Image: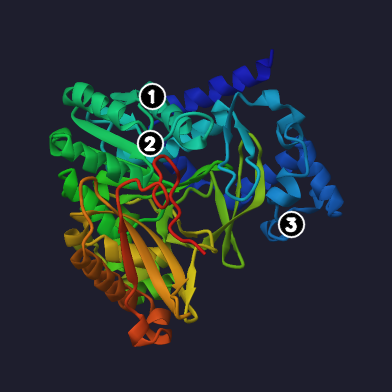
Amino acid sequence: MLTHRTSEIQNRLHHFLFRSLDELMADRLAMDAESVVLDLFHRTASRVPAYRTFLGAHGIAPETVESFDAFRQLPLIDKPNYMHVYPLPERCRNGRLAECDRVAVSSGSTGKPTFWPRSIIDELDIALRFEQIFHDSFKAHERSTLAVVCFALGNWVGGLYTTSCAWHLAAKGYPLMVATPGNKKEEIFRVIQELAPCFEQTVLLGYPPFIKDVIDAGLAAGIEWPRYRVKMVFAGEVFSEEWRSLVSERVGSKAPCYDSASLYGTADAGVLGNETPLSIAVRRFLADHPKAARELFGESRLPTLVQYDPISRLFEVHEETLVVSGDNGVPLIRYHIADKGGIVDYGEMRDFLRDWGAVPLIDYGLDETFPCRPLPFVYVFGRADFTVSFYGANIYPENVTVGLEQPHIMAWATGKFVLETKESADGDKYLSVTAELLPGATADDQKCRTLAESVKAQLLRLNSEFANYTPPEKQLPKVTLRPFEDPEYFPAGAKHRYTRR
């Protein structure tokens, strides 16, 4: 019996359950993140055998790391040099896998799937991210709420992790019921039709393209989404603000900053940050002002933009990619997650917005009377290798997405596509976009021309490399329309890839 764990779990549960979100966040804002991460480093070096051995192999004595500057000189850890080198138990606290009580599996997109154990103690920290969304955005402490988990269930991190964190909020006293149909549309519709009328609002949580599929298929099946005051929580993919507006309109939402939120999370480290009404309003401003976005992010594409709690997960930037430190079943010290992105301090963001004349953000849906939590921002483009090169221009899926997500096109297209460079029989390169039709929609030449012109217009607006490098006669992509859930390009149930090489 691990009685010391029982006592620690009881203390942490009591702390989470019996203190308000405002109290918990006020405590964190008063802490010094650099001191907290230094303490985590020393605890990890003392209690985690693999990390102690890793430091020794690099000739580092933990007691010499006494400042944050010294901490920033520590070697990065990643899957090849740490996770795949040391046995799983040795990467856990006290070298015991039994110190954890649950496990998730990464998708294996970078190689062999990896197991990520954690405990309820680690999970409570992540539950705060969900509480920020449910409290600050959805007012779920004031409204009876049905939360419908539409992520796939099983060992993969999204479904059960989300479910467990939502259960913690219910245990805390939120009038919240959690339903778990997973990614089965028929079961989701059964839950909505039977249970949603009993609640003041309904929250759909899932992968963005799947949530849109659920909404579209529900409309076709006669579900009147506006009746249920639908809110949405997304994770796993960057999407455009045009897409958010479109999906919000289809469920009857008139307040996208408060009716939806995206999580930035990984199986490795849990939820690293979350959209807030402020971050969404900022992103909607940047979507309307590409020059401002390029100044802030250094690229034409619009990344996911979230706020994060540095007491929970501390970010650094290494060669334009993200490094994170945080406690977990497998504690992470300067873990290189390799997502392309960066960080912006809260004050720096406010100054940037003021310089661009974007304060206040009322025009972009932010209620300035509601206090914003002064947390820093992290922006995430995703993996750096999901681009297509065409005439020397790097073309990002995010640029093409905006072309598809125009209202007159989304009337017959799902928004999913595959971007490729192909070669004609004469050996000429051309840009290819294969797009998925909505159920029941049919392909024709006019739709292909409309979509091609829309994609071209957005590429010219958003991507200066495309506008300057690509000859005008090559700028119009060739569009192919495929049926809904086409097995070659859009197989049902598979995580979609937006580029092919």
- Eye-nearest disc, 2 or 3: 3
In the rendered structure, the answer to whether residue 488 lies left or right of residue 193 reads right
Residue found farthest to the top: 1
How far is mark 3 from mark 1, CA to CA? 39 Å
User: Which of these two is toward me, 35 or 45?
Assistant: 45
Are the residues tagged 2 and 1 within 8 Å (C-beta)?
yes
Residue at x-position 26% and y-position 37%: 139
User: Which of these two is toward me, 175 or 203?
Assistant: 203
In the rendered structure, the answer to whether residue 25 lies left or right of residue 360 reads right
Q: Relative to 140, is 258 above or below?
A: below
**Coordinates of residue 401 in the picture (x, y in percent):** 33, 62
Say what amino acid the circle numbered 2 marks.
Answer: Glu
Say what amino acid the circle numbered 1 marks.
Answer: Lys
**Going from the N terminus, do you reach mark 3 or mark 1 first?**
3
**Coordinates of residue 325 in the picture (x, y in percent):** 61, 49
List the residue tagged with mark 3.
75
**Going from the N terminus, do you reach mark 2 or mark 1 first?**
2
Residue at x-position 40% and y-position 55%: 238
Residue at x-position 56% and y-position 51%: 314
**Going from the N terminus, do you reach mark 2 or mark 3 first?**
3
Quarter of the rendering occupied by the N terminus = top right
List the residue tagged with mark 2.
131
- Eye-nearest disc, 3 or 1: 3
Packing grade of label 1 (10 A; few <14, some 14-19, many >=20) is some
